[in-house]
Amino acid sequence: MPRSSAVDIDRIRRALADKPPKLLDDPGRGQAAVALILRDAKPGLEVLFIERARHPRDPWSGNLAFPGGRIDPGDAGARRAAERETLEEVGLDLTQADYLGQLDDIIGAYLPVQVSCFVYALAKDVAHATDLNHEVSELFFFPLDELRNPARQVQADIPWNQKIRRAPAIDLLGPNRPLLWGITYRLIRQFMKKLGMPALSPHL
C-alpha cells in the first residue's frame, strides 16, 4: 500500500496538543501505563511493538503490545511508569526521547484495568533496542501507514482467559503469529483518529 498520509513528528505533536487527553480516575481499577514509540524510517514513520512472553499467570501472555505495565506506588505518575517499564522491558531510555503527548485513557474491556498511553519519537541515532527482559519475547517496528492496509484488517476468534472472543484485529506478522487486538488495537485506532488519518478499513 503506498504511503500517502504524510504524517510526520511535528504533525503528531500538534495533533496531540490540539486535543488534550481525557484522563480517568477510577481507584477501583488497576492502573497501567504504556508507551507508543515512533521512529523515522524513511519513507515513513514506524511504530514499536513487542510480543509478550508466554506465561500462564499473565493475562496478556503472547499478545502484541506496546511496552509498559502496572503503575507502582513509587512511580512519579503514569508517564514515569511508562518510561520505567519501557527501560526495564526493552532497554530504551525514553527520558532521552522526544515526548509528543498523551492519548485518552482507556478502560480494559475484559479486565478491571485503566491504561494511560504516552507517545514518543526516538532520536535518529538511537540504536535498535535488543535488551529484552524475560517479559518480552520479541521487539519489532512496523510502518504506521501499513497498519491501515485493508488486507491486514480481520475479525478474529481470539483465545483469551480460557474463552474465545470475536474481535477486530490487525494481522502484522502473518500466518500462525499473534494478531494485534484488544487494548493496543484500541490505542492505535485512537491515535490514528487524533491524527485525522483516513480510515481504510471498517475497523479503523
Image (cartoon, grey):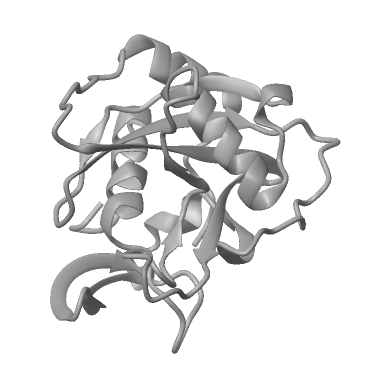
Q: Is residue 58 above or below residue 203?
A: below
Spot occupied by residue 113 in the image (x, y as percentages of width and height): 23, 43
Spot occupied by residue 52 in the image (x, y as percentages of width and height): 50, 65
Q: Residue at x 66, y 40 (%)?
A: 87
Location of residue 40 by image quarter: top right
Position of residue 16 in the picture relative to residue 135 (left or right): left
Q: Nearer the viewer, residue 158 or 53?
A: 53
Spot occupied by residue 19 in the image (x, y as percentages of width and height): 30, 15
Position of residue 88 in the picture relative to residue 159 (left or right): right
Q: Residue furthest bottom?
A: 176
Q: Nearer the viewer, residue 193 or 81?
A: 81
Location of residue 132 by image quarter: bottom right
Q: Residue at x 38, y 72 (%)?
A: 179
Q: Residue at x 71, y 33 (%)?
A: 93
Position of residue 47 in the picture relative to residue 168 (left or right): right
Q: Is residue 123 above or below residue 99?
A: below
Q: Is residue 82 above or below residue 3?
A: above
- Taking the image as drawn, is residue 197 in sight? no
Location of residue 57 by image quarter: bottom left
